[in-house]
Amino acid sequence: MSHLLDPPAPPDPPRPADDAHRGSRRAPTVVTVTAMVVVLLAFTAAGMVLVGRVVSTGSSTARAGAPGAGTTAPGPSAGATGPTRTDAGAATGGTPDDRPAIAVHGSNLADPFVLTVAGVGYAYGTNTADGGNIPVLRSTDLRTWQAIGDALPALPRWAAAGQLLTWAPTVSPVAGGFVLYYTARVTALGIQCVSTASSTSPAGPFADVSAAPLICQSEAGGSIDPSPYTSGTDRFLTWKSEGIRAGHLPTLWAARMRPDGRRLAGPAVELLHPGLAWQHGVVEGPAMLARGGRFDLIYSAGDWHSPDYVTATAACAGPLGPCTAAPEPFLRTGNAGVGPGGAEPFVDADGNWWLAFHTWNRKDPASSPHAGRQLVLAPLSPSGPPAVSPAPRVRIGRTVTRLDTAGSMRGSTPSASAG
């Protein structure tokens, strides 16, 4: 999947060469033979004591996990150029350093949100021509995904149907079921606004029986990209006002929610405006990472259908801000596919943190704005500021899944094509 990286990534450090490591390089045969000869000579000259010492301390070949190395020493620490994996590329379990990034090729799932319920992962995304209003995928291991239909088969009466204007869904568990937050076009106003729908199952179907949207900042040109979060027992929602009307800028907002997750419980508070050159006047797709007493706003910036689209962070003083943007984005074209955006953090069934986001499936999406975008899952730092691992480069394409004719997405070997 080298076409997911632009420019190409530098060579990886040596990796285990068993067949389960779908993207790893095999150690050259001559290195293996040489290592065996050295060990045999050492054994003859110095006996078992020396051999035991070599194995226990670990030679460079053993640390790289080459075939026949005996035991494998711990992998590199955080901040190394890449992970050393001894788990054959398992998608879950372990630390962020030994989990591969997963690119779900063929998923066509923009603005993704992943929710884990009873050991099952559900991935929701922006509408597609063949996936319905809210396409949803399901997986029990994050590596094998199955498309299971439309989570929101019917829109409310006020919303425009069949126009591919249902965007950026997120889902939150509440008492008695689940609440879906999403963006739809208000037919009477001609702008995008935020609404909610309910279901007893994370797979849906969700139903929206509202007479009007939940949030609709018409003076700013509309509201999009809702994302729920909690702090203790309190619920909150963050979103973007479009900022396409005179006198307004695109702005990220947050507000406290009532316990049912369906209504606001306090005033909207501004979190962030664009002001840095690489934001190109646009901030959107907010998601608050609230954990360990920290509040970090993860958001997208720039032109959504170009390689300039990026994912960035802002440190916030509390669940309602104020927030201060980091000086540079942490995911951009060249270290995380092409135009990485729509990022949302989540926890898997084993308690590991991940970041779900989308990338374009071609190098130059600007030449074809509606080219498909694919779901990507990258290991997220377990604490502290948001960081994906391995640092600094996310090697997308190590584990790839493809859509088969039955509608399920199964693991396959990454393509070597640069196209």
Image (cartoon, rainbow, N blue to C red):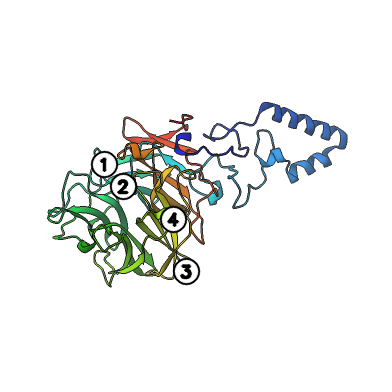
Between discs 3 and 4, the one toward the N terminus: 3
User: 240 left or right of 31?
Assistant: left
For mark 3, give the secondary structure: loop
Crowding near pointer 4: few (<14 within 10 Å), some, many (20+)?
A: many
Residue for badge 3: 293
Q: Could you tell me residue 180's position as x and y percent?
A: 27, 56
Evaluate if marks 2 and 3 touch, with contact meaning CB atoms under 8 Å apart: no
Which amino acid type is shown beneath numbered disc 4?
Ala
Q: Residues within 10 Å of mark 1 (few under 14, many from 20)?
A: many
Reading the image, the residue beneath label 4 is 312
Q: Position of residue 417 (x, y in %)?
A: 46, 29
Q: Amino acid type of disc 1?
A: Thr
Viewer-proximal residue among 86 and 386: 386
User: Real-space Cα distance between discs 3 and 1?
Assistant: 37 Å
Measure how far apart labels 2 and 4 are at the Cα level.
Answer: 20 Å
- Up-down: is 68 above or below 206? above
Neighbours of disc 2 within 10 Å: few (<14), some (14-19), many (20+): many
Residue at the spot of label 1: 128
Residue at image coords 15%, 49%: 160
The mark found on residue 301 in the picture is: none
Mark whose residue sits in front, 3 or 4 = 4
Relative depth, front residue between 106 and 49: 106
Q: What residue is pinned by disc 2? A: 125
CA distance separating discs 2 and 1: 9 Å
Mark 2 vs mark 4: give the one in front. Answer: 4
